Each structure stands twice: as C-alpha cells, then as structure tokens.
Amino acid sequence: METPKFAVSLMCMDFSIAGEQVSTLSQHADSLHLDIMDGHFAPNLSLSPEWLKWVLPHSSVRNEAHLMTTDPDYWLEPLAQVGVNVISPHAETLNTHAFRTMNSIRALGCGTGLVVNPLTTFESILPLIERVDLLTLMTIDVGFAGQPFIDEMLAKIEQAAKYKSDHGLDYEIQIDGSCSEKTFAKLRNAGAETFILGNSGLFSLDRDLDKAWAKMRANYERTTGETLPVED
C-alpha cells in the first residue's frame, strides 16, 4: 500500500489567523480540504470562493474543494479561478448531469473528485468511477464537524479499494469524517489512502499547529504500526 496522505479541513481552523494557519499547514499536509456548503444540501454554511481568493495564495499544496451544494455546476468556474486544483461534487447531486459536470471540471483544468454520502452505495457510482481522480467516502453525515464515526462505512472503503485493485484504476481513496487515533488503524486496514484531519484528528491536539501535527503523526504511527516518512 502506498504511503498515506493527509488533508486538512480548513473549516476547523482558526479563521482569525487564516493566512498564518494555511501557511503552517502547507508545510505538513499533502492537501487542503475546502468545504463549500450552500445551506441547502448540507444544513450549514462554510467557505466561499471569495474567502478562498484571499487565503489560498498562502497555500503551497493541493487545494481540493468539497461541494456540499445542490447545484455543483454554479461553483465550478469561481473555484477554479481562485486556485482550486481538484473539485469534488457529491454523487447525490449529479443524477441528471454527472458526465457533463465531470467534463466541465476537466475543461477548467482541474482534477475530478467525487464525494459519496454514507447511504449512497459504491455500486451506484460505478458508471462514473473511471473518470474520478479523487474518491472521497464520507464516514459521517454531511454538514458538521465532530460527529461520531459510522463503522458501517468500512465495508464501502474495502469495496472501493478492491475495485481499484481488480480493475487497475488509480483513483485516490480519501476519507472524510472522524479521522483520528481512534479510527486510523481500521480505516487504513480497510484501504484508506488519504485522511482528512479536522478537530478530533488535528486541531484539538494543540493550539500550536506544528505541535498538533507532530502529535497527529505520533498517534498515527502508534495506532497503525506504520512509520511515516520524515518530513522535509
């Protein structure tokens, strides 16, 4: 299995020092996870393209947008314009225009992501899977950080990993929801490749993000038995 990657959910950071925190996180993380919520698909409001325009210049890693929006196409061009590298709509919002939306994301020069809610089956996304660069599997319900991990999702992660291996595909399996010392091992064993870190996995560990990152790495290595590469 490839070396694990770590993304950070910016909705969990300290917004009063956003630029400083993004700069620090970029020294450690493989990508920044940008939650875009419209208050309809998910019962919350979060980051916006206008806010990201001022923050993403501080980022030196992959910027990936997670569209918790009822109309994903509305957000594609504004996000691409402010420096988002991968755009991930929810499978549940693409019933009538999935391939058109994926083509639009590609045409903007961005990677194609896809996010799958807990109750959405892996089988239902198979017609689209070969067009997906980044597959994000939700292990909590959308909308709020700090929810309990849904153990039933481990079987879906195993499905995604097996299908990828059996068919020689290269989509990246990313997990969104309660990635922490309590879940690292079982997620990794199921086939998780990228872990999105939020409150439980990172920000609650220390106010100093460098120290919090060191604690996260120690938690990962201790619970999985896997040694992470030394950071540059």
Image (cartoon, grey):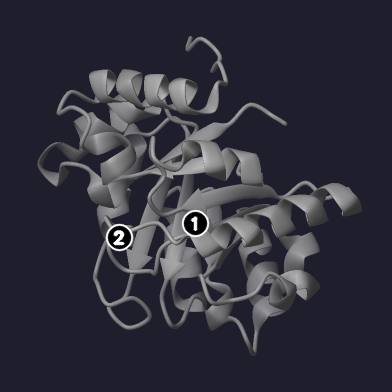
Q: Which residue lies furthest to the right in this view?
A: 167
Residue 159: horizontal and vertical position, in percent?
Answer: 73, 59
Query: At 33% from the left edge and 18% from the top edge, which residue is drawn?
Result: 214
The quarter of the picture where the N terminus appears is top right
User: Helix or strand or loop: what does disc 1 sit on?
Assistant: helix
Whether residue 195 sits left or right of residue 159 in the image: it is: left
Residue 211: horizontal and vertical position, in percent?
Answer: 25, 18
**Which of disc 2 and disc 1 is earlier in sequence?**
1
How many other residues sit within 10 Å of disc 1, few (<14), some (14-19) or many (≥20)?
Answer: some
Query: At 64% from the left edge and 74% from the top edge, which residue is drawn?
Result: 121
Q: Nearer the viewer, residue 84 or 224?
A: 224
Amino acid carrying label 2: it is Gln
Q: Which residue position holds label 1?
A: 80
Query: At 44% from the left edge and 70% from the top edge, which residue is drawn?
Result: 75
Q: Which residue position holds label 2?
A: 147
Residue 160: horizontal and vertical position, in percent?
Answer: 71, 57
User: Helix or strand or loop: what does disc 2 sit on?
Assistant: loop
Q: Which mark is residue 42?
A: none
How many other residues sit within 10 Å of disc 2, few (<14), some (14-19) or many (≥20)?
Answer: some
Amino acid carrying label 1: it is Ala
Whether residue 227 sits left or right of residue 60 in the image: it is: right
Above-or-below relation of 103 to 139 = below
Above-or-below relation of 71 to 166 = below
Label 1 or label 2, whichever lies nearer to me, is 2
